[in-house]
Image (cartoon, rainbow, N blue to C red):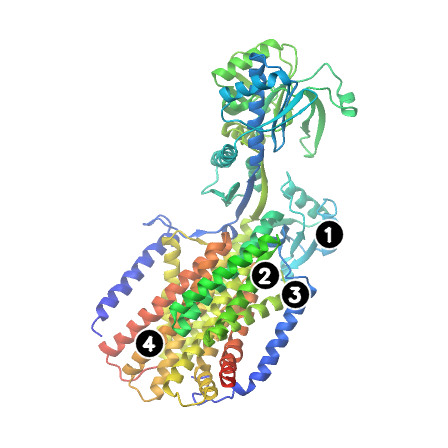
């Protein structure tokens, strides 16, 4: 059985302008959405506050729940249906985080039951203080930063087979990060980590450009592309960022490279084999030759994540969704983002 | 391939080890007795992060020193006009001019570990700020956190939670994981109480109502007695005027037990002092007959009985309208002792057991559903070779399970998601190899050559793809706590297991068919 015929020959490279427009539009929309929403919407993990998951024995209305909640001072709170319609489960969120008070959960149960007239089962409480929320936010961004850093070093060494050079890049990057940190500290900037990540990425790209590490450049650009779009989709759909979502983003960072690696390895192999041929033809040939496995590997992963998304339950739902988007954009970017960057390089060296 | 037997031995060894480690999870009690731990999100339980107010520990040390100073200055007849602890600043001591030299002389001899921070003079009165050296303060803070951890561990052990995890996080935070706990409120009350037990005399010379309206008289303060009505659970407060001076603390307690009052059939807590405490208690009760002695816990008055006579046995009882449960918990915290400083709950995550078992059910269901689709797909798409990949997939899951048990890692809900992802990724490696083999076959290679080429060419690509995922997983492991860490663990295990199954196991099966069965065509 075969999905993709072995002699398939789609002209991918000629569509790179269209792909470029599509990607740019997606990234711009993502960034605009992030600006409009004033950054990603942080869940309780990062913003501090309290999240309560409650299940009722019979259908209740959100208004009744709110009426019950009004009895106790909860601050700014919101109520939302959770999971399947027939499970009568709701999420209550509030920005207050000092709910450790005595008898809180008992009181909550009582007011919910008198408000709705049904039996309430409090299944989950997550209370995160503002300080812990800030710490976790910082930690999450650092985790993103370090995984990008390590992967950058690995790629620059592995794709270009120049480990010495990758060591050099690592040193430059770390120095750059130290300098930026010093500057941030000097101006006592809050939330310096996003700046740090952005700056480190720019330094990386500049390094790759001047050192002519085109494969590494293509891979990293594709990676950033995938992460921005995933974050953007979350922002547009107004889904919360929680600790598991960060885990999903890190997984995307690791996984979305898979397809890129497959294509790039083939391009290098073919370049050695047919070094007379034009790069454009080699790239196109390589993408076509590997198209079957690109689609298949993404497909198998997509299927299992889809299973998780559909039946894994409410708590894991957003996590699965993030990985779904990551796989889709990762597959797309390996063909339409990473490879065209190699061509852009050819343009650059010709002009010289 | 001559080394086929060696590889066979290796594969068998790995698989048998995995099976041995997986078995105790299925059948409890089997050797090596290492079960897969379930995270709090799967078995239900409570995760708490507490912060110890270590500043308070420093402050109470300063308070103690200032009392000693007061006594010693009197003894040495060094005149002073005021001594007071300032929050975060040290002890402020006011001295007339003639005392300054004497005092400095005295302090450099008797209180070597104190240092004088600043001095200022005005109208013949000097203000000296005395403080602990910075490293001493740091030491006190560190000790406070460690002592708080010990005390909390004591309380939890006596409360009876199976396999609690209590550890210090950072400088002054304590992480507590209580799996399977049902009454979370009770546990929180038990953990969070400072449990500073004090005996103080009631100020009966002044009126409470006037003290409420105006300021309480110097040397006294208003504390509240909490009454609880049995049925409604509502509590009411009665203000009481209590002398500030602590007559006796609970530091000298040796035991605290729940007893039942035979007359009213009500539980109370009986406490026992050590020798020194018993002597002090006898002295205090003897000197204050017919006066009221308030039993104060964390600035709340539990009861204030009238002293009927000198109590010399070193035993006392704390009454109050307790339920048996409350009396039991009070006895536990009195036995475990007071926290050196108050604690604050910074983070709390509670998962009910029903949600946990729901999560397991849904997680396993997703694994089965995703797994079946992938298995069928590989079988249809790659036929015989697909079957080999499917065998590899099952072994892969077995290896993850064995790895989780062997490393005593914790399986969490995101961890289950990690297993599911691994199912998708594990076949990826086989897809890469099989596609390459098909390609080589199309070029007219023999099955043997095609398999050799397929594996050798795909190996590097597979390694790369997995290394990047592994990098992300390892970073995640470093950064994550609880559920997220569980995801990093299963993902890392899964990546390593899939490298093993794809590059060693499936190759071995192919080689077996090629060499031992001498098959001429590949089913792929």
Q: Distance between the Cα atoms at labels 1 and 3?
A: 30 Å
**Contact (Cβ within 8 Å) of mark 1 with mark 3:** no
State which mark lies toward you, 4 or 2. Answer: 2
Tell me if B495 is positioned left or right of A207 in this view. Answer: left
Chain letter of the residue carrying label 3: A
Residue identified by numbered label 3: A34
Which quadrant would the N terminus of chain A be assigned to in this image?
bottom left
Numbered disc 1: what chain?
A: A
Which circle, 4 or 3, is nearer the viewer? 3
Residue B428, given in percent of the width and then of the height, sits at: 42, 73
Identify the image quadrant of residue B204.
top right
Within 10 Å of disc 4 (Cα), the crowding (few <14, some 14-19, many 20+) is many
Mark 2 or mark 3, which is nearer to you? Answer: 2
Tell me: B101 left or right of A286. right
Q: What crowding class fits label 2: few (fewer than 14 Cα within 10 Å), some (14-19), or many (20 or more)?
A: some
Q: Which residue is mark 1?
A: A66
Q: Is residue B16 left or right of residue B83?
A: left
Alpha carbon separation for disc pair 2 and 3: 15 Å
Which circle, 1 or 3, is nearer the viewer? 3
User: Horizontal and vertical percent for residue A171?
Assistant: 44, 62
Residue drawn at x 48%, y 89% as measured from the top left = A9
Residue B455 - label: 4
Number of residues whose C-alpha sits closer than 10 Å to that of mark 1, classed few (under 14), some (14–19) or many (20 or more): some
The residue where tag 2 is placed is A195
Could you tell which of marks 1 and 3 lies nearer the N-terminus? 3
Tell me the chain of label 2.
A
The answer to whether residue B248 of the structure is visible from this angle is no
């Amino acid at each position: 059985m075969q999905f993709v015929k072995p002699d398939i020959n789609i002209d991918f490279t000629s569509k790179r302008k269209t792909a470029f427009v599509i990607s740019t539009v997606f990234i711009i929309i993502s960034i605009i959405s992030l600006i409009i929403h004033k950054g990603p919407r942080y869940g309780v993990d990062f913003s501090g506050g309290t999240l309560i998951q409650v299940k009722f024995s019979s259908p209740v209305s959100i208004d009744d729940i709110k009426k019950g909640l009004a009895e106790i001072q909860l601050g700014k709170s919101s109520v939302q249906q959770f999971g399947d319609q027939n499970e009568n489960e709701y999420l209550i969120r509030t920005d207050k985080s000092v709910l450790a008070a005595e008898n809180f959960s008992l009181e909550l149960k009582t007011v919910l039951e008198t408000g709705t007239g049904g039996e309430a089962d409090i299944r989950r409480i997550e209370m995160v203080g503002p300080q812990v929320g800030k710490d976790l936010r910082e930690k999450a961004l650092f985790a993103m930063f370090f995984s990008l850093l390590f992967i950058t070093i690995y790629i620059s060494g592995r794709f270009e087979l120049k480990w010495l050079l990758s060591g050099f890049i690592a040193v430059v990057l770390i120095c750059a990060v130290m300098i930026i940190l010093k500057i941030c500290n000097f101006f006592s900037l809050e939330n310096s980590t996003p700046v740090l990540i952005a700056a480190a990425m720019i330094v990386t790209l500049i390094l790759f450009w001047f050192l002519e590490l085109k494969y590494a450049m293509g891979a990293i650009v594709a990676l950033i592309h995938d992460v921005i779009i995933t974050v953007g989709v979350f922002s547009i759909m107004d889904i919360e960022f929680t600790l598991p979502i960060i885990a999903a983003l890190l997984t995307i960072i690791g996984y979305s490279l898979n397809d890129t690696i497959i294509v790039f390895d083939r391009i290098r192999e073919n370049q050695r084999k047919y070094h007379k041929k034009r790069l454009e033809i080699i790239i196109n040939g390589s993408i076509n030759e590997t198209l079957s496995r690109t689609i298949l590997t993404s497909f198998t992963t997509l299927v299992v994540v889809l299973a998780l998304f559909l039946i894994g339950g409410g708590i894991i739902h957003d996590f699965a969704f993030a990985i779904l988007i990551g796989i889709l954009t990762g597959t797309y970017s390996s063909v339409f983002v990473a490879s065209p960057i190699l061509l852009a390089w050819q343009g650059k060296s010709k002009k010289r | 391939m001559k080394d086929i037997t060696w590889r066979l031995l290796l594969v068998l060894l790995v698989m048998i080890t995995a099976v041995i480690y997986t078995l105790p999870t299925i059948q409890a009690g089997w050797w090596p007795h290492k079960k897969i731990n379930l995270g709090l999100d799967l078995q239900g339980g409570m995760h708490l992060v507490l912060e110890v107010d270590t500043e308070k520990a420093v402050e109470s040390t300063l308070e103690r020193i200032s009392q000693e100073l007061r006594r010693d200055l009197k003894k040495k007849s060094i005149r002073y006009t005021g001594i007071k602890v300032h929050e975060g600043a040290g002890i402020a001591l006011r001295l007339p001019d003639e005392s300054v030299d004497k005092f400095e002389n005295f302090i450099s001899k008797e209180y070597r570990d104190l240092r004088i921070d600043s001095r200022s003079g005005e109208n013949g009165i000097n203000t000296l700020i005395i403080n602990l050296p910075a490293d001493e303060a740091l030491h006190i803070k560190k000790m406070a956190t460690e002592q708080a951890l010990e005390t909390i561990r004591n309380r939890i052990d006596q409360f009876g939670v199976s396999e609690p995890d209590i550890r210090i996080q950072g400088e002054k935070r304590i992480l507590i994981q209580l799996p399977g706990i049902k009454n979370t409120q009770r546990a929180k009350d038990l953990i969070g109480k400072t449990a500073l037990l004090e005996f103080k005399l009631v100020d009966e010379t002044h009126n409470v109502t006037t003290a409420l309206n105006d300021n309480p008289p110097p040397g006294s303060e208003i504390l509240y007695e909490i009454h609880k009505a049995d049925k409604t659970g509502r509590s009411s407060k009665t203000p009481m005027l209590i002398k500030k001076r602590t007559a006796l603390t609970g530091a000298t307690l040796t035991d605290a037990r729940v007893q039942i009052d035979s007359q009213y059939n009500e539980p109370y807590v009986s406490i026992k002092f050590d020798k020194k405490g018993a002597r002090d208690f006898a002295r205090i009760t003897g000197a204050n007959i017919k006066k009221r002695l308030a039993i104060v816990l964390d600035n709340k008055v539990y009861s204030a009985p009238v002293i009927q006579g000198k109590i010399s046995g070193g035993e006392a009882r704390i009454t109050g309208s307790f339920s048996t449960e409350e009396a039991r918990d009070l006895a536990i915290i009195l036995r475990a002792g007071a926290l050196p400083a108050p604690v604050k709950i910074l983070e709390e995550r509670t998962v009910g057991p029903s949600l946990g078992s729901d999560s397991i059910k849904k997680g396993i269901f997703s694994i089965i559903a995703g797994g079946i689709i992938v298995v069928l797909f590989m079988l249809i798409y790659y036929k015989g070779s697909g079957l080999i990949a499917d065998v590899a997939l099952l072994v892969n899951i077995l290896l993850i399970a064995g790895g989780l048990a062997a490393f005593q890692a914790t399986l969490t809900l995101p961890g289950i998601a990690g297993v599911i992802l691994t199912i998708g990724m594990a076949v990826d490696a086989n897809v890469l190899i099989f596609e390459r083999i098909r390609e080589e076959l199309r070029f007219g290679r023999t099955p043997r050559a095609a398999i050799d080429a397929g594996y050798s060419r795909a190996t590097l690509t597979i390694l790369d793809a997995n290394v990047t995922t592994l990098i992300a997983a390892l970073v995640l492991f470093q950064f994550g706590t609880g559920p997220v860490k569980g995801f990093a663990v299963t993902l890392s295990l899964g990546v390593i297991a899939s490298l093993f199954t794809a590059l060693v196991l499936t190759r071995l099966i192919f080689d077996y068919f090629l060499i031992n069965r001498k098959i001429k065509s590949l089913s792929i």
